[in-house]
Image (cartoon, grey):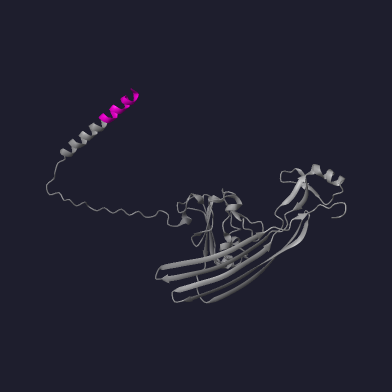
Amino acid sequence: MFSRARFYPVTTTACCLFFAASNATAASPSFEGASDEIERISVYADQLFQDTTKVSPTSVVTEDVLEAINLITSEDAVAYEPSLVIRRRYVGDPNGVIGIRGSGMFQTARSLVFADGLPLHYLLQTRFSGSPRWSLVGPDEIQTAEVIYGPFSAEYSGNSMGGVVNITTKNPQTRRFVAQGTLISQDYNELGTEDNFNGNRVYFAYEDVVGNLGWFVSYNRLNNKSQPMTNYFVSADNAQLLEDQGVSGFIEGLDDNGESVIYIGDSGAETSVTDLYKAKFVYTLNNAEIRATIAYEERTRDEDDKRNYLIDASGN
């Protein structure tokens, strides 16, 4: 009964509308001399904000400023910009996540990083696993770096809630050969580790322009050792037990929560090696520009030098 009561009124209404429409059509008057052509009306809508800087707070690092920065990796170009932080634990750290304004470092899907319009970010993972692929851009390639603090523009997707980093690389201008070398050294004395951790970077590039075609080839290698990334500890309640067994070498301290612990070892140095091979071609035709970039990167990390602070009664 309930379903029939709902069905019939709807059908009756539909029929009434049909007949009303038929009568209206039949009664439509015809005008003598009326043309079948419809007047064309063109409506043009101009962008309200053609320049992103009018909508979002923006900071641009120019080429002159970059020349004054000791660029070891591409993160250095924007690492000291306001309201921005990059979690780089050591030079060459592949887990350099970015935090901008209200977007934390472990909310990696809320920040976008581009190099010449190509995305370096990875939105399918978060935390340190979702860090941008900074190492796909050689430091000497960068011409300008722009930080757009947002989300105040529809120019980018909703993943720009924190902000956007736009890196623009240099176009080949003339025949040029570049060779760079950098040495890195860190004196580290913390807990049971007292050591120097060293590294180096070498960079070679060649560019040339013939007619409308310019090309650029480069090789960038970064090899660096870090301080220990992890310190191993147990509860301080184990200190007396170890002493009773003649074990020494552990270090008393506090953990991240302020609890008393004893440190018994660390993960040792982490070795990070990155080899980047890159070729870029730029063809200019009137006001058009065609770019092609080919890059191959091989990156390895080793952490095979774990340290044990504990010493038994025999000195082992």
Residue projecting furthest to the left? 32
Please give left or right for residue 230 compared with residue 134 in the image: right
Residue 15's x, y, as percent? 23, 32
x 61%, y 62%: residue: 299
Residue 162's x, y, as percent? 54, 50
x 51%, y 50%: residue: 159
Q: In this view of the protein, which residue sits in the foreground, 166 or 132?
A: 132
As displayed, is residue 19 above or below residue 43?
A: above
As displayed, is residue 14 above or below residue 87?
A: above
Residue projecting furthest to the top? 1
| Residue 234 visible in this rendered orientation of the protein | yes
- Type of secondary structure dominating the magenta stretch: helix
Please give left or right for residue 58 compared with residue 313 in the image: left
Residue 197's x, y, as percent? 72, 62
The residue stretch that appears in magenta: 1-12
Residue 118's x, y, as percent? 50, 60
Magenta stretch holds residue 2: yes
Q: In this view of the protein, which residue sits in the foreground, 287 or 222?
A: 222
